[in-house]
Amino acid sequence: MIHSLSANKPSFRTLSFTRGLNVITADKTEKSSDRDSRNGLGKSLLIDIIHFCLGGSIRSSSPLSNPILRDWAFTLDLSLAGRRITITRNVENHRSVILRGAASDLQQLTGAVSSGDRTEIRTSELKEILGEFMFDLPRAGYDHAHKPTFRSLISFFSRREAQAYLNPFRTVSQQTEIDCQVNNAYLLDLAWEYDARLRALLDKEKSFRKLLDAQNISVFGEAFGRQGELEAHRIRLEEETRSEFRALKEFRVHPTYKNIEENSNTVTARIHELNNLNIVDGRRLRFYENSTATEQLPDGSKVLALFAEIERTMPDFIARRLEDLKAFHRQLISNRKAFLANEIERLRDRIERRTAEIQGLDAERALALEILSTHGALEEYTTLQERHSAKVSQLHEIEEKIKTIRNVQEWQSRIRIDKEHLIRAARQDLEERHHQREAAISLFNSNSQRLYDAPGNLVVDYSDTGIRYDVVIDRSGSQGIQNMKIFCYDLMLAQLWSSRTRSPGFLIHDSFIFDGVDGRQVARALELAEEESSKKGFQYICTMNTDRIPRDEFRAAFDLDRYVIMTLRDVRETETLLGIRF
C-alpha cells in the first residue's frame, strides 16, 4: 500500500493516498489557453515517478529524462508486508536508493544488520526486496532462463504507457510470448515452471534448427539425401575403398620405371621399323628369286630367220655380227644372274640380321614389360593414393551425413517425447489447480457482469506452446470494450492478491484505461473499483480528465469527489504535479 509520494523540491505537490479508491483528476479550466494541455499536468508523470521509486528505468519519452530534473529526488512512502518504509531515489544518482524506516524493519527487508533508520542500497537490491515482499519471489531468483521478475509483475498492477492498454495479458508492446505466459501464470497461482521449461525446450529446438540451417542441413535430412540412398552409396564406397587399398598394398614402385617405360616404347618402335624394312626387303627378295628361276636364253629362231634374209645381201657382215651378238647376249645373261645372286644374298643377309636384332629387341621388351606389369611408377602410385584418399574422405562425409541424420532424428524424437510429457504434465497440473483457475475466472466474470450486465469469459487452457489466455466480453471489438477487458483482468489480479500477506496492495490505472469507454461503463468501473478495494483492503489509484467523468451515470449514493485526492490544473504552473513548467 502506498501512503504518500513526495519530492525534494518545495514546488512538488505531495500526494497522500488512502485505502480504497484514490482519484487524481486533470482539469482544463475556462481560463486555459489553446496551447495549454492536460498532457503536461503530470497524470502520466505521476505513474512514471511511482515506477521510478520502485526501481524502474527512466524512459527516453518520460519527463524524468529532461536535464532540468537531474537534481530531483522522489520519495515513496509505502508498506511492505506490514513494514512501513520510504524509498528515496535521485534522478541523477539513480543506481542506488535510500531506505528509511524502523531499524528492525530495514534489517528484515535488507537481510543486513541496520545501525539506524536509514540505509543505502543498490537499485538492483531494491528490486529483489520488492520482489520478495510484494510477490514472494526468492531473492536468488529462479533457476530458469524464463522466470518472473518484480519489474515484469508490478507492471500488471501499474500499467505504465499507452501500449500497456492494448492487451490484458501484456504490459509492453514488444513483450515476448513466454514472458506473457510466465508472468500471468505466476500471478494466477498456476504452474508457470511448465511454461518456462516448455519455452526452454522450444528455444533449444529453435537454436538447433538455426544451427542446422547455418550448416545447410535439413532437419529431416533432405539436404543430404534420403538415408536409404546414403546407405547404398556408403556400401559402394566401402567396397571401392577396400579394393583400392588392396591395390595400394600390392603396388611395387620401380625406381627407373619411367626409363624402362620409355626404352620399351623405343624398342617397340624399332621393332616396328625393322619389321617394316624386312617386309620391303622380303618382297624384293621374292621378286629376285622368281626372276632367277625364270631367267633363260631367248629363242633365236626368229632372229636367225631375219639374219638369213639379210645374209643374201651382206653375207660377210652378217656372219661376223651374229656371232658377236650371240656372245654378247650370253654375257648379258650371265651378268644378270650374277647380279641377282648377289642381291638375293645381300637381301637375305639383311633380313637375317634384322630378324636377329628383332629377336634381341623383343626379348629386351619382354623383360621390360614384365617389370612394367609387376611394378608401377611413383607418380602412378601417388595418383592412386590421392584417388583412394579422396574416396575415403567421401566415405567419411557420407558416414557423417548418415550420423547427422540419425542424430537429428533421435533429437527430434527426444524433443517430441519431452514436449508431449511436459504438456501432459502441465495439463494435469492445470486440472489439479482448478480451484485457483476457477477463482480467477469467477472474479473476472463477476467484474465483467457488473459492467455489462452479462458475464464475460476468462479463458485459461493449455496448448502446445504453453498456457493460453484470452478474455471474451459480448460486444467486443471497440477500443472501449478492449480497455474494460484490461480493467476487469487487472482488478481480478488485485482482488486475488489482496488476500495475501505479501502483495503490492495497490492497482494503478492511467486515464488511458477509460479512453473510448461509454460513460455508463466508466461509472460502473469506478464504483466497482471503490467497492472491491474498500472491501478487500487494497488501493485503486487512477487518473482522469475531469471532462471524462460521467457524473450523471453514478449511483446516487456514490460521490466521486470524496475520492479525489488531487486535481491538477493548467492555469498556473503551481497547480501542476511538479509545480514547474519545462
Image (tube, helix red, strand yellow):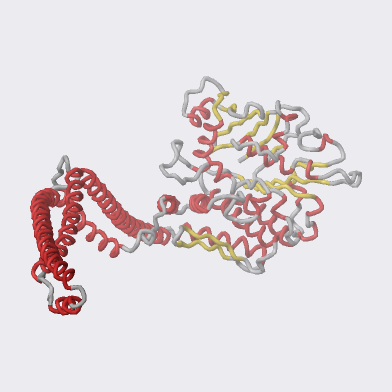
Establish if 6 lies above or below 284: above
Q: Where does the C terminus fall, quadrant-wise?
A: top right
Residue 233: x and y in percent read 27, 61
Residue found at x 56% / y 24%: 120
Near-viewer residue (339 or 393):
339
Residue positioned most to the top: 115
Near-viewer residue (61 or 368):
368
Q: Viewed as shown, does residue 215 lie left or right of 459?
A: left
Residue 31: x and y in percent read 91, 44
User: Is residue 250 something one can see in this rendering?
Assistant: no
Q: Where does the N terminus fall, quadrant-wise?
A: top right
Residue 320 lies in what quarter of the image? bottom left
Residue found at x 79% / y 45%: 26
Q: Count all numbered tags in the image, as a single digit.
A: 0
Q: Viewed as shown, does residue 163 lie left or right of 573?
A: left
Residue 282: x and y in percent read 14, 62
Establish if 222 lies above or below 579: below
User: Is residue 312 something one can see in this rendering?
Assistant: yes
Residue 10: x and y in percent read 76, 27
